[in-house]
Amino acid sequence: MENEGQSYTLDEGLASVGFGKFQILVLFYAGFGWFAEAMEIMILSFVGPAVKLEWGLSANQESLLTTVVFAGMLIGAYTWGIISDKCGRRKGFFSITMITSGAGLISSFSPNYLSLVILRGLVGFGLGGGHVFLSWFLEFVPASHRGMWMVVFTTFWTVGTVFEALLAWAVLPNLDWRWLLGFSVIPSFCLLLLYGIAPESPRFLCLKGRTIEARHILEKMSLLNRTKLPPGTLVTNGRIEVDEESAPSEHQPLLSAAKKQMKEFKSSFSSFFMLFSPKLFRTTILLWIIFFGNTFAYYGIILLTSELSHGEGKCGMSLLHSEGQIDDGNSLYIDVLITSFAELPGLLLSALIVDRFGRKISMAVMFFMAWLFLIPLVSQQAPLVTTGLLFGARMCALGSFTVACVYAPELYPTSVRATGAGASNAVGRIGGMLCPLVAVALVTSCHLKEAIILFEIVIAISVGCIIFFPFDTTGKELSDNVVAVGSDPKKDIQDET
């Protein structure tokens, strides 16, 4: 046959099938996962004040409702990264949505504060796997214009935050926070219903030697996109692999199977330690600092908006509503909704510059702009000016955070991609755990100036770390093995986990 002896790599196959209807369907499924996560995060701006009022909670107890979610996300981000790297992306986000939807629904029936804290922490554990959806979608996209499509993917996050603000506005004045918790888990249940049609990542399958399954998925992609695959056989790392799933086997000794399970168990820990190998150490540390700063600033601005909207001017500071202004009960929803819409121009800005100027410059410029927007808030400003500055700060912080979420999985090889991105997200969750102590505790104790200064310091350190990244992934193919940062990702270096 004329195609006999010919072969092509996964990246060549993805480039041939292009970006079409198949990727659009994957985009909507993965994006809906981020939509659901955004709703569960944004709900913190509304549930805390509502529960505090109903149960007479202290400021520290209100802050704990937010902190415990990020604590769960901290643990979940790393855990789900390992699971998806070892068991597959599909199994990963199935378990994620099961826990998130189940714990979220049960939390709406919480009889007391302690049970609510525990259940929301469990919801946070499920939410910690949101990066798996991003990694999954990333592995279906060709290298060309990958940055733009990843930014489009993160648009679902913004839509989720806006939708949750509108949902809270409709539900809370008429019902209560329990109904809001119940309605907010509906998207997660929808993900479970559609799970059966979600394909496994062909890049993950190739890594595991399951090239026959990977080729079948590529054939479905080409059929739906109305394109053609290159002639020949799909290969990984430049050589034809034996499909470990389909290879015939008469029998497998029990001891051999036990050894294989033990090896896989140990490899779960080696995946994490591989992040600190000489070739990845610098990348890992810089990413951790950047994710901490991004998350701290982004969620800090969200919670800062929520807290300021409840202010009565008693501290003599710049609050979103001046002293003596009549609060009609809608101020919180209006302020959160306005600043949520700030994410749309932030996403548009990041989409325009991420592929043109690269990941590093895009992150640094937008984060520096967020720093500039926050500076005037250290002194008293008019309510309208304060809202406008928070609008601009959130716009730029979200833009930088979006590029960071694109950059992180691109930097790591397939064998540790979800683990690396998950560990970065986990460190970012520490920032999310600490920011309520700033946005809630400091503002309510009349220390807004100190809170803003702390945000500025964290952002400045993060921008400095961005500059020290030696490698930009713009337009480059994803790596399957551990390679030196900045080297050719096509070279097969035997440093696999």
Image (cartoon, rainbow, N blue to C red):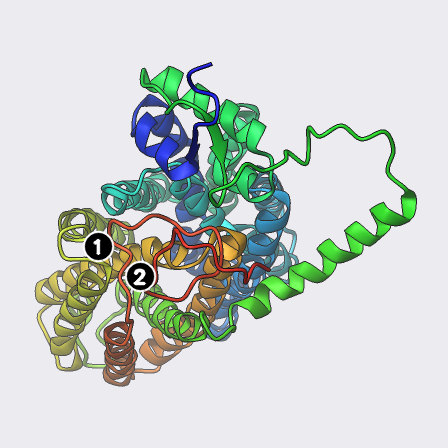
Residue occupied by mark 2: 302
Above or below 145: residue 357 = below
Residue 345, given in percent of the width and then of the height, sits at 15, 49
Query: Looking at the image, do the residues carrying marks 1 and 2 touch, with CB atoms under 8 Å apart?
Result: yes
Above or below 318: residue 225 = above
Q: Amino acid at mark 1?
A: Thr
- Residue 19: tell me if it is visible: yes
Residue occupied by mark 1: 339
Above or below 404: residue 177 = above
Residue 234, given in percent of the width and then of the height, sits at 48, 31
Residues under labels 1 and 2: Cα distance? 8 Å
378 to the left or right of 150 = left
333 to the left or right of 118 = left
Q: Residue at x 23, y 59 (%)?
A: 359
Name the one closer to the observer, 115 or 187. Answer: 187
Considering only order in the chain, which callout, 2 or 1, is on the residue closer to the N terminus?
2
Name the one closer to the observer, 476 or 331. Answer: 476
Secondary structure of residue under mark 1: helix
User: Can you say which quadrant of the picture contains the C terminus?
Assistant: bottom right
Name the one closer to the observer, 30 or 223. Answer: 223
